[in-house]
Structure formats: structure tokens, C-alpha cells
Amino acid sequence: MKVQLQSLTAGLAALPEVVGQNSTLAGIYRTGEDSAELFVRGISREEYAQYAATLGGVLHSENVIAGNCFSTRTDIVPGRTLYVGYYPTLMGGTLRLIDEPTGVLPETAPAPYERVCSTTIAQLGRRAVEINNAPGMSYVIQVASGEFIIVDGGPTNEDDIPALLAYLKENAPQGKKPVVAAWLITHAHSDHMALANHFLERYVGEIELKMVGYNFPVWETVQNCHDVKGDPNRYLPMIEKFRANAEAYGARRLILHTGQRLYFSDVTLEMVFTHEEQYPVDMPWVNHTSLAFRLITDEKTVLILGDCEKTLCQQMADIYGEELKSDILQLTHHGVNGGCVDLYRNVDPEICFWAISQEKYEHDPRCTGELKGHEFNGFIRDESIRVRKHYAASTTTVIQL
């Protein structure tokens, strides 16, 4: 069967047709004002390889995760970038093609660096976890060059904002201004990105910010989402403020896509999920638009799940399997909701980060796994399966990577 790729963007419309014995065009998804994704079901691995060979353009990068194939190509159409993803076990073989205007692209190899410090990840202890119902999360990774990667930051809190700056200054190479190589936002809930905006507005000149990374959806396209109904653009002011803050710092803006690898001296960041993989399944909560990624060093691997909900976690378990084995796991959605046993079994971490208070970790029946539907937390805490180290966010925990 031949699939004509007529779509929302000039880049996708210019692609060659997909030819497959059982192929069908399964959907088109608008991912930006001039960006879109389409996906084709029923593509065998051989048909995918044949199709990939016809694409042309310039191959920027490629990656394989557990047999799933990813590549980035530029200039099939001048000024546009194509992200290709092939999932052999999903829907009889799924081909996803994402076209967007060419913007910032990650480096394809690590840059030379001098080791000036140990590589660490910190789950910052925050006042907000004790006083807010939605405590958010804040992780700071320091790479060997002394630069930092910040993940989210949490909700606005007058104690936590200066505490983040203090952590960066205390751990920056002596006598140097803290350099944030990347500030990554998993999704657009305020308990994850509000602090970032207030921090960046308050501390202009106190840090250097090189890049921000995210992948927010077009809110009108998020299907049946209860927290955007009636006002699909309610999250735009916070997002636009974050973009403006990044511009004020001269930071590059990177739209993150599954399969990408980013290099930060001795740490490799590998994207494993965005909202583009969730489509065409309904996204009833902004949590369904959360990013997930791995942080990989020579010694350890960390899996960051943000607030990924159960359907996302199950899909990751299904398509990646034991490839997601990691030493450290950030339990999804603060360790409260959204996980699944299959994913946690595959990850099998030694260390678990819970972005909640110690009191919630100890007594909330969702977190203990006692509440029906939360068996995944019972599994991850079951010491008859494995004795793990569990850290809540009431205090700061720093782990060597």
C-alpha cells in the first residue's frame, strides 16, 4: 500500500510516499505553528530501512534504543529539520515523522573538557514540599566541567528561590560564576516551572545560562485535557515568560525530541519520551505531555520521568524493555501517581528519588502502595524484591555519578 504524505507543513508534504504491504496513515498531529508530526502504522523493519534510504537531505545524527531507530535530517526541504522515529513493536511497526523549522540542534559528540569536580545529581530539599499540595520537583546535575544541568525547579517559594542560587554558588568552581549548561522543563505545570521564571527574573547577572530545553504541545491539539478545557492557552503566559527569560540570558532554545542525545562533558542526556509519542492516545492531563530522559555516565544511569502518567510509562516499558535499566530512578509524578509495575521492574533502580516530603513518603497510602491502583509503589518499596535506598525531598540528597 502506498501512503501519500499530505500534511500540515511543507516539509512533510515534500517527503516521498511510504510504501508498505500493510501500511496506513494513522494520523497527523500539529506540534507547533509551523510544525507537525504524522505517523504510519504497519511498517516492517525492512520497509522502514528502504524508506529511510530515500529521504535524502543531510543526516545530522542517528541513534538506536532497544531496537527503536531515530534520526535527525536537515535540508530535505531548505530551512527545515525532519525527526524520524521507527518503533518495530508498536502497532505493527510505527513510523513517526516530525517536521519543524530548523532551530538549535544538539552537538553530535562531546566537546573537550577539563575535569574540575565530581559528577553529581542533587535532589534539592525544598520548603515547598512541606507546605504545598503540589510540591513539584527540583534536580541539579553537576558535570565534570563544573557546569550544571537543572531539571524543572518546582513551584514559586520564597525560601527555595535563593536556596537554588546558594547551591549553585557553593558548588561552582572556586571564584567562578555558576554556569548552567541547560535548564530543562519536563512540562508546563506551575509546580515544575514557576520557580524557574522567578529565579531567572531575579538573578540576572548572577549565573550564566547557555541553553533551555523543552517540548510543549500546541494546547488546542491536546485531546480531552481537563486542565486546559475552556482555556486551551492558559499555560502560554508562563511558557512565554520562560522563553523571554531565556532570551534575556542569551540562552539557546532547544526543542527536545525522542532519540536525541545531548552531551555535557561526561554526561550524556538521552531523550526517551515526549508528547509526540503519546499521540493519538488522549491526553487528559498536562502530565501526559511530560518529557522523560536518561542521564548516562561511565558509572551510573539516571532515569528522569517528570510527571509521566501510566499510559506513557506503560508505553516506555513496552517499547524499551530492560534497556531502561538504571541505577537511579526519579519516581514519576512525585512518587504519588502514574507509574506502572512493568516500567519499574525494567528500571530496577538501586536509588529512588521521591519529589515529596518525608511525611508523605512514609504515610500517604498512594506512596506506600496500599491504595488500590498504586501497586507500582508497593513494588518499588518491597524489600523482599530488592532493598533500595529511598530519598524524599524534605532534605537535600547528593549522589555521586
Image (tube, helix red, strand yellow):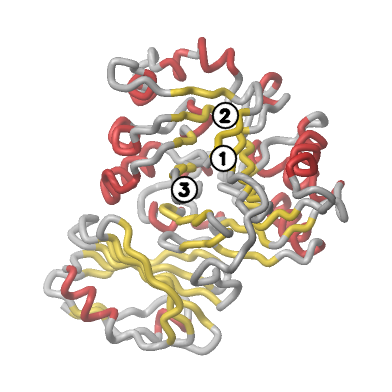
Q: Locate the N terminus and report the quarter of the image it occupies.
A: bottom left
Mark 3 falls on what kind of element? strand
Q: Nearer the viewer, mark 1 or mark 2?
A: 2
Compare marks 1 and 2 and give the one earlier in the sequence.
1
Could you tell me residue 198's position as x and y percent?
80, 44
Q: Name the residue under label 2.
A: 355
Residue 339 lies left or right of residue 113; in this view the side is left
- Tell me if label 3 and label 1 are in contact, CB under 8 Å: no
Mark 1 falls on what kind of element? loop
Residue 97 lies left or right of residue 135; in this view the side is left
> Considering depth in this image, is 30 or 214 the residue closer to the camera?
214
Q: Residue at x 52, y 42 (%)?
A: 401
Inter-mark Cα distance, 3 to 1: 21 Å
Q: Residue at x 45, y 36 (%)?
A: 328
Residue 293 visible from this viewpoint? no
Q: Quadrant of residue 93?
A: bottom left
Could you tell me residue 118's position as x and y percent?
61, 44
Q: In which quarter of the image is residue 115?
A: bottom right
Residue 106 visible from this viewpoint? yes
- Kindly identify which numbered label has been placed on residue 292: 3
Q: Mark 1 points at which residue?
A: 227
- Amino acid at the residue labelled 3: Ala
- Amino acid at the residue labelled 2: Ala
Inter-mark Cα distance, 1 to 2: 22 Å
Compare marks 3 and 1 and give the one earlier in the sequence.
1
Count all numbered tags in the image, as a single digit.
3
> Considering depth in this image, is 36 or 198 the residue closer to the camera?
198
